[in-house]
Amino acid sequence: MPVEVDVGLATLSDQLTLATVLLYIVAMIGYALDLGFGRSKIAKVATRKAEPALVTVGGTADAEAAGSAGSTGEEGGDQADKAPPVWVVWAAPVAVGLTWLGWATNLAAILTRGWAVGRWPWGNMYEFVVAMCFAAVSAFLFMHIRYRSRFLGAFVTVAAALGLGFSVRYLYVQAGPVVPALNSYWVAIHVTAAIIASGLFIMAGVAGVLYLIRKDTAVRLPSRQDLDRVAHRAIVIGFPIWTFAVIAGSLWADKAWGRYWGWDPKEVWAFITWIAYAAYLHARATAGFKGKAAMIVQLIAFACLMFNLVGVNIFLGGLHSYAEVP
């Protein structure tokens, strides 16, 4: 019996996805303004407060007078640092608010797509990428609340906006039923775990790219220590979830095809991705293999992840070729 599609909900889902792209783009602009103007001013004010007063014995009054004069003379130049424009002050909170709003519309787009077709809403590449972008922004918001990693906001939101734009432009398919193999409760287990882990790995990948391209003179970008810390924590959380996704996929394969492992391209690359991230965690824990070398291993693992999630379905096919790539 064919599944009836609620056209109204399906159309609403498409519109919510487009609205999410717009919200993420505007949020990215807000983060960029905060990163370009807000952080440098805060750093300068903090540096001035941390500088001790240099006073010689017997010259306290003279030193204080000189300091007062110097402060008065520089007041015009430092006024912008002490009192940044209102749009700079509000750029960050507005960006965070827009990110939460985009997160909500992204979630609503996923839910309405699922309700429109009466199934789990990640049965093809379009739906999977939309869910993966949602997971990436969710990972960023979690890391922002837990570890104050707002400095990655501009880069995560632009990555999510580009991912959603790519899915709408090149991967979009009409809402409809899926092949019988995907009508299983294992979709809620295996694919959901893969989506959550992928969102965390994307967060780590963005931090890794910034780590490698950051120059020592780029004072407005987050430090390499902060980037390394965020990437490592995201992978530490995401790696066991990816491990569970691989194991759940094997169990689903046994139920669907009668074997746990069959050298299908998707299975092979999922395992290669697992090995690559395990290599990063091992490298990160090795005394002589930290910093840039470990980050390069992490980005190799991230490239394996992206090829597994997108490239395999487009170029290699196999038993997972039901992704419905246009």
Image (cartoon, helix red, strand yellow):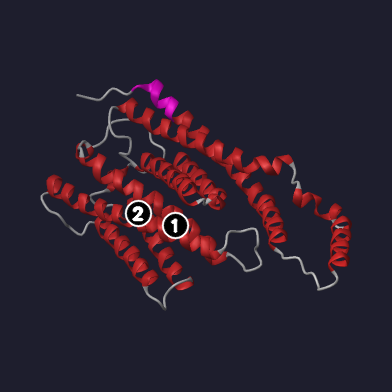
Question: Quick one: quadrant of the N terminus?
Answer: top left
In the foreground, 324 or 100: 100
Above or below: residue 2 compared with residue 227: above
Residue 307 visible within the image: no
Q: CA distance from mark 2 to mark 1?
A: 10 Å
Magenta region: which residues? 6-13
Secondary structure at numbered mark 2: helix
Is residue 99 covered in magenta?
A: no
Provide residue 48's location: percent of width, then percent of height: 73, 60
Q: Amino acid at mark 1?
A: Ala
Query: Residue 97, can we see it?
Result: yes
The amino acid at mark 2 is Gly
Q: Nearer the viewer, residue 234 or 265?
A: 234
Q: Which residue is mark 1?
A: 204
What percent of the width, then of the height, locates residue 45? 71, 55
Q: Position of residue 226 (x, y in %)?
A: 52, 60
Residue lying at the far bottom of the rendered structure:
288
Q: Earlier in the sequence, mark 2 or mark 1?
A: 1
For the C terminus, give its image quadrant: top left
Relative height, residue 82 to residue 95 (above, below): below
Q: How many neighbours does mark 1 have within 10 angstroms: few (below 14), some (14-19), or many (20 or more)?
A: many
Residue located beneath label 2 in the image:
238
Residue 123, by quadrant, is top left
Could you tell me if the residues under marks 2 and 1 are in contact, i.e. CB atoms within 8 Å? yes
Q: Vertical placement of 49 versus 153: above or below?
A: below
